[in-house]
Amino acid sequence: MSSRYIGFTKGVDHWWTRFLHPKINHCYLMTIDRGRVIVYEKGITEVKVYTIDEIDDKLGNDRLLRWNTVESEQGLFMLNTCVGHVKQLLGINRPFIWTPYQLYKYIGSKSWDS
């Protein structure tokens, strides 16, 4: 079981962002491995995987939550969005969490080991 961090931020503006929370409309995943921070981020047209030296190099005004990955059965359906990818990698099997803000509220309401 590894510990990962989920970053929540205001992403780029597109036509659908008017339906999302004004301050939390994008999410990404970070994990620490061998002293480096690996960032996994689903963009609009691509998936970005890159490393940074420190978590603070990425944060800025982002909100960061910690989550311990758990094993769960994969669902038959996954939205190809930042939320869908983060849920899949974290083992969160909640089909009606569709937006970054819903995921933020869900993760924030759960308890985990600090």
Image: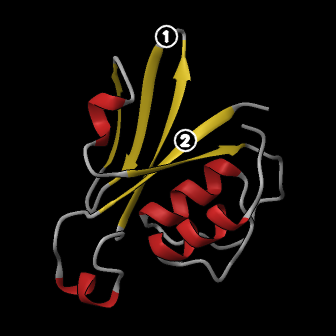
Q: Mark 1 points at which residue?
A: 35
Apparent side of residue 111 relative to residue 57 in the rendered image (left or right): right
Q: Which of 61 and 27 is in front in this view?
A: 61
**Of residues 78 and 33, which is closer to you in this image?**
33
The scheme the figure's colours follow is: secondary structure
Q: In which quarter of the image is the C terminus?
A: top right
Around disc 1, counting alpha carbons within 10 Å, would you say few (fewer than 14), some (14 to 19), or many (20 or more)? Answer: few
Instruction: Residue type at mark 1: give it.
Output: Gly
Eyeballing the image, is 45 above or below 17? above
x 62%, y 48%: residue: 89
Q: What x and y, as percent, mark residue 76?
A: 72, 71
What whole-number distance in Å separates the C-alpha atoms at marks 1 and 2? Answer: 15 Å
Q: Earlier in the sequence, mark 1 or mark 2?
A: 2
Which residue: 34% across, 17% down? 53
Of all residues shown, which one is farthest toward the top? 34
Q: Is residue 3 left or right of residue 17?
A: right
**In the depicted view, which residue is nearer to us: 66 or 89?**
66
Q: Do the residues labelled 1 and 2 touch (CB within 8 Å)?
A: no
In the rendering, at what x and y percent does residue 82 appear?
A: 43, 61
> Seen in the image, is 80 located left or right of residue 112?
left
Q: Which mark is residue 5?
A: 2
* Residue at 61% in and 59% down: 87
- Residue visible at 31% across and 41% down in the picture: 59
Quarter occupied by the N terminus? top right
What's under tag 2, amino acid-wise?
Tyr
